[in-house]
Image (spheres, coloured by chain):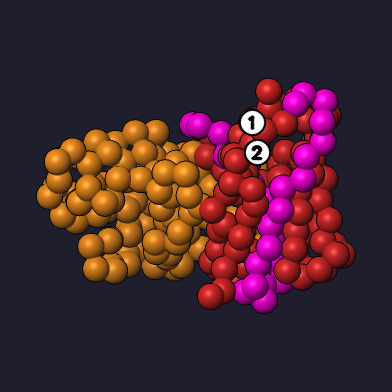
Chain colours: A red, B orange
Amino acid sequence: DGGITQSPKYLFRKEGQNVTLSCEQNLNHDAMYWYRQDPGQGLRLIYYSQIVNDFQKGDIAEGYSVSREKKESFPLTVTSAQKNPTAFYLCASSITGGFEQFFGPGTRLTVL
Amino acid sequence: GEDVEQSLFLSVREGDSSVINCTYTDSSSTYLYWYKQEPGAGLQLLTYIFSNMDMKQDQRLTVLLNKKDKHLSLRIADTQTGDSAIYFCAESKNTGNQFYFGTGTSLTVIP
């Protein structure tokens, strides 16, 4: 079955630690995205990538980093510089120029 | 980024129609979408409309677009308890892959 997987579903981290969220897709999509979801604020774009080895900052990139070494994978690192990292993180992908984004199930990150 | 606004909550009785509203600011948007998010899950595309259309109907779903007022609505006929979820309005242009999502409307269906 084609789709997007995110792991883990729940993640706990101590303050001051970096943590990496995984996102993998087998849909052969060129474009991939990371969003952050907070209650009452909808989805905010963190980073996106339209092709391997290239990515652009979204609206709230500070304190986050990404890599795109393979078409299928777009991991997100939440660094210790991110001041309020507790949130629900969603990964998505689409074909280039396509009008539908396909979403993964999300990772809930809690900073203790 | 562009502003996409929605009211946060809506409650309806089972069997009634639900109308979820959205306003956006970017008049150059090409595609407008409605996504559904069930608790603890990702988003699923429900329907979309091109900016040169006024209305689109898909089974129980009707999308209305008023370009002049930059207003989009989603009507769900005969609302069921399984329709309880958060509904997101979104927009994009055909010049790139950036999507802009609204704040989401949490729909509660009362049996």
Q: In this view, does B21 lie above or below B47?
A: above
Residue nearest the observer in this picture, B73 or B42: B42
Task: Identify the residue shown where x is 50% and y is 32%.
Answer: A39
Residue A6 appears in the figure: yes
State which tag comes first along the sequence, 2 or 1.
Answer: 2
Residue annotated with mark 1: A110
Indicate the quadrant where residue B86 lies: top left
Callout 2: SS: strand
Find out whether residue B68 is within the magenta segment. no
- Amino acid at circle 1: Thr
The mark found on residue A53 in the picture is none
Residue count near mark 1 (Cα–Cα under 10 Å), binned few <14, some 14–19, many ≥20: some
Residue count near mark 2 (Cα–Cα under 10 Å), binned few <14, some 14–19, many ≥20: some
- Amino acid at circle 2: Leu
How far across and down, in percent of the image, does residue B92 sit? 57, 58
Residue nearest the observer in this picture, A10 or A40: A10
How far across and down, in percent of the image, does residue B58 sit? 29, 69
CB within 8 Å, label 2 to label 1: yes
Callout 1: SS: strand
Task: Identify the residue shown where x is 36% and y is 39%.
Answer: B106
How far across and down, in percent of the image, does residue A42 sit? 53, 39
Residue B26 appears in the figure: no
Quarter of the N terminus of chain B within the rendering: top right
Q: Mark 2 vs mark 1: same chain?
A: yes
Left or right placement of residue A66 versus residue B85 in this view:
right
Residue annotated with mark 2: A11
Name the chain under label 1. Answer: A
Task: Identify the residue shown where x is 65% and y is 38%.
Answer: A11
How far across and down, in percent of the image, does residue B47 sit? 39, 64
